[in-house]
Amino acid sequence: MDPSESGRDGEDEDKLREVIDALEEEVEVEDRSDGGEVEGEGEGEGEGEGEGEGEGEGEDEESSMNLIKSMTEKLATEPVKVRVHDIEIKGNVKTKDSVFEAQLKELREVTTMQELLQESVRANSRLRALGIFDKCVITLDAGPEELPGTANVIVEVEEVKRPFSGDLGVFSKPETKAWTVEGTVKYKNLVGFAETLDATGCYGLDSTSELSAGVIYPRFKGLPASLATRLTLLTQDWQRFSSYRERLAGVSVGLVGDDQHDISYNLTWRDLKDPSRSASKSVRRQLGHSLLSAVKYTYKRDERDSVFRPRRGIAFISTTQIAGLGPDSRLLRFARQEVELRLAIPLGFANAAVNLGVAGGVILPWGPGYKTKPTPISDRFFMGGHSSLLGELKGPSSLLGFRTRGVGPNELRRPTVAQTDKGDGEVDAAPKRDTLGGDLAVSGFADFSFDLPLRFLKDYGIHAHSFICAGNLIPLTGENTSQWSLRNFLSNFRVSSGAGIVIPTKLFRLEVCLPPSYQIHIFFCYFPLSACLNDLQMCNIYPLLDFLF
């Protein structure tokens, strides 16, 4: 059995047990309140009449309690056969029935009361996750009398009054030492298919800019995945590190799975330029227009208890990309594979944990002349920069203590006109070089985090950590392949270590590490203003229970 499935089954059993316990507690509270009212009425009307009513009510209470006990014991110990007869939707004004059918189709496949309870909780979560309802309540009722052992599912919703939303923020990108201003506008359920239309704009102080627009259809055509389409215009400036500026214009279409699987197709026109006219020979060979036609598949599992400070759990991601799909010989043709594995181990004291991670990637060209053809520089692996070791899975790129794109092959830039006009006594102290990236990259890290002894630091989540990380990358194609060997690859690994303090807040995460360098990592996170309701509170099962038992 899949560990993730067994984990979900265990969670469902816990939720079912919570529902049963809640039923028992609520019945006990109602019985106590009813008993109090009866007793008060008896005192006001007369002793004899009050005693008679009290005895009758007491018998009803006892039989009710016995029924509840037998009902809960039966639910907990043996399956109760039931099937769904009908699903009724109430309150939808704009939303199409097909949206509800896609989100509730699993309910029609249940065979027991236990499965019906579990699927009702999941269906309620899926409906609320669409973001188009202010209220969503699922009621389980008895089916027609002529069809024993059946149930009706009643879904009551209240559509949102403001389907549009927007975000605006300032973000730091430690890997490029740049700041960007990003804004997003979203409109949900415009035509009633629970679709999300969004437009995003981004402008960076390093001349990076992006404009994109897209639409997402949840559970497209009944599939357990959402259809996502997007148009993108992007400009990135890498002159500081590799002497080129990149412009992209493309469209992507993909299926984003509800669990771990994503697949997408991307068609992108790419243009690389060298405005400074100082690029190295290897970079100059990559300049010009190119067309990328690629399909990408991603498998991801993340069972960690936290993203930014995991204390237990495991995470894994694998990304496969095949480019060059099409008859045009000018298409970029390569295969790219990237994997990463994270493991968090609790130590049992001071909230301490050890996080281990290893990542690797390889990119190789294919097609005619692949043995001598270099891989596209924009798709190679680069390593270095001040990005946190923890957090989201991002492949073999993080290596603290080294400058951005500071690890791996590099080449001397072409001298500019100003440099050639210098006299004999004027010589640059450190000639600039272009980082070329690598076709094979491997990196790993170990991080030890623990709480500080002061109580107020614990209350705010401020903690300390120490780390060690290592990595290296090399070319596998082009002119430098003859210099490669496994021994040189292992002996040239870069290693850094250090310690620091982590200060998490609701808006960003501040991480200060010393040595080998003073680093600040800021991650902005948005939090919804509305409170999240418990799944179990959104499922009304009393009418059906009264019928079944």
Image: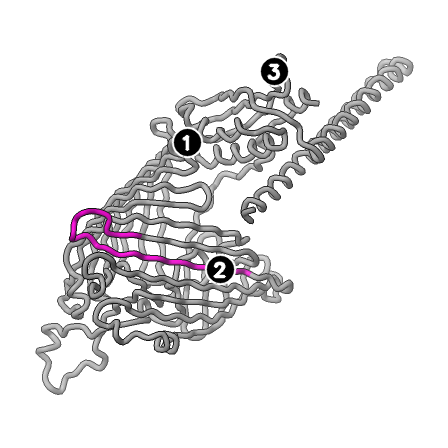
Q: Amino acid at mark 1?
A: Gly
The residue closer to the viewer here, 477 or 509, is 477
Question: Is tag 1's residue or tag 3's residue first in the polypeptide sequence?
Answer: 3
Q: Amino acid at mark 3?
A: Leu
Question: Is tag 2's residue or tag 1's residue first in the polypeptide sequence?
Answer: 1
Specify whether 192 is left or right of 144. Answer: left
Instruction: Rate crowding at label 2 as few (under 14), some (14 to 19) or many (20 or more) other CA atoms within 10 Å.
Output: many
Question: Is tag 2's residue or tag 3's residue first in the polypeptide sequence?
Answer: 3
Q: Which residue is mark 3?
A: 147
Q: Amino acid at mark 2?
A: Arg
> Which residue occupies 45% across, 41% down?
258
| Measured Cα–Cα span from mark 2 to mark 3 | 52 Å
Q: Which residue is mark 1?
A: 222
> Which residue occupies 49% across, 29% down?
104
Specify whether 424 is left or right of 380. Answer: left
Residue 216 in the image, given as x and y percentages of width and height: 35, 37
Image-quadrant location for residue 284: bottom left
Q: Is residue 43 visible?
A: no
Name the element at disc 3: loop
Q: Is residue 348 visible?
A: yes
Instruction: Say the numbered circle drawn on residue 342.
Output: 2
| Measured Cα–Cα span from mark 2 to mark 1 | 33 Å
